[in-house]
Image: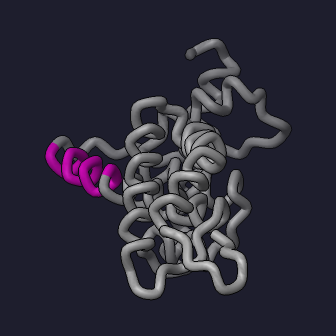
């Protein structure tokens, strides 16, 4: 939110102007990653609430579209972490784990890949999305997921295997 030299503008007004410009980008970023309209809307609202809180600080940070997308990325990672904790709790209650070692190659069909990704647990979806869709390095994925680098690498191995299994089911007409 740039201000002309010597002019003190209301940060709330500037945020409203940024909201109009940034809303489609923030919402689009979230929707493309989570694939759920209601969740993307909720996380978009949380992102802009974080911006409102930020402009109330003295001095307010420089807030732009990139800043908002970064906050949105963190909000999505937080959501996936919470969902992962819930899934682990349910898994412990039912104790139903499946181990997969499925070699796979080739280029995925986009629709089947999206459906396969949607079937994965939140922790696998988060790791794969941050690493391969967002192109983040493993250490940054680890930081966003609150894991060590080694644990994140292991998670990525399991997530890729789960994705391969789900995707193979889509290719064989199972989905």
Is most of the magenta stretch helix, strand or loop? helix
Residue 57 in picture, x, y percent from top left = 38, 81
Q: Residue at x 74, y 29 (%)?
A: 110
Q: Nearer the viewer, residue 81 or 51?
A: 51
Q: Which residues are magenta?
A: 83-93
Give the residue at the far left of this rendering.
93
Relative side of 50 to 64, left or right: left
Colour scheme of the picture: one colour
Residue at left 73%, top 61%? Answer: 135
In this rendering, position of residue 141 left or right of residue 107? left
Q: As rendered, which of 105 and 40 lies closer to the eye?
A: 40
Q: Is residue 84 magenta?
A: yes
> Quadrant location of the C terminus?
top right
Specify the farthest residue to the right: 106
Q: Residue at x 50, y 77 (%)?
A: 143
**Percent position of residue 61, x then y:** 53, 80
* Position in image of residue 101 (x %, y %): 59, 48
Q: Disc count in the image?
A: 0
- Outermost residue on the front side: it is 6
Asked if one can make out residue 163 in the rendered structure from this viewpoint, the answer is: no
Answer above or below: position of 8 versus 45. Answer: below
Tell which of 85 and 21 is nearer to you: 21
Say above or below: 154 vs 6. above
Instruction: Depth check: give the residue in front, 98 or 43.
Output: 43
Q: State the residue at coordinates (60%, 59%).
A: 69
Where is the N terminus found, in terms of image quarters? bottom right
Q: Is residue 31 magenta?
A: no
Q: Would you say residue 121 is visible in this rendering?
A: yes
Residue 74 position in % (x across, y down): 48, 64
């Amino acid at each position: 939110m740039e201000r002309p030299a010597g002019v003190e503008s209301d940060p709330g007004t500037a945020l409203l102007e940024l909201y109009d410009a940034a809303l489609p980008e923030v919402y689009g970023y979230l929707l493309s990653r989570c694939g759920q309209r209601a969740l993307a809307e909720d996380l978009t609202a949380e992102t802009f609430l974080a911006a409102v809180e930020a402009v109330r600080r003295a001095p307010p940070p420089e807030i732009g579209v990139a800043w908002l997308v970064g906050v949105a990325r963190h909000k999505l990672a937080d959501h996936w972490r919470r969902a992962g904790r819930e899934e682990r709790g349910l898994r412990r209650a039912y104790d139903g784990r499946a181990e997969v070692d499925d070699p796979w190659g080739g280029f995925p069909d986009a629709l089947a890949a999206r459906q396969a990704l949607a079937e994965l647990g939140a922790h696998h979806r988060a790791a794969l999305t941050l690493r391969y869709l967002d192109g983040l390095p493993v250490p940054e994925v680890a930081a966003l997921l609150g894991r060590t680098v080694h644990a994140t690498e292991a998670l990525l191995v399991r997530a890729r295997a789960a994705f391969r299994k789900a995707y193979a089911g889509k290719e064989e007409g199972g989905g």
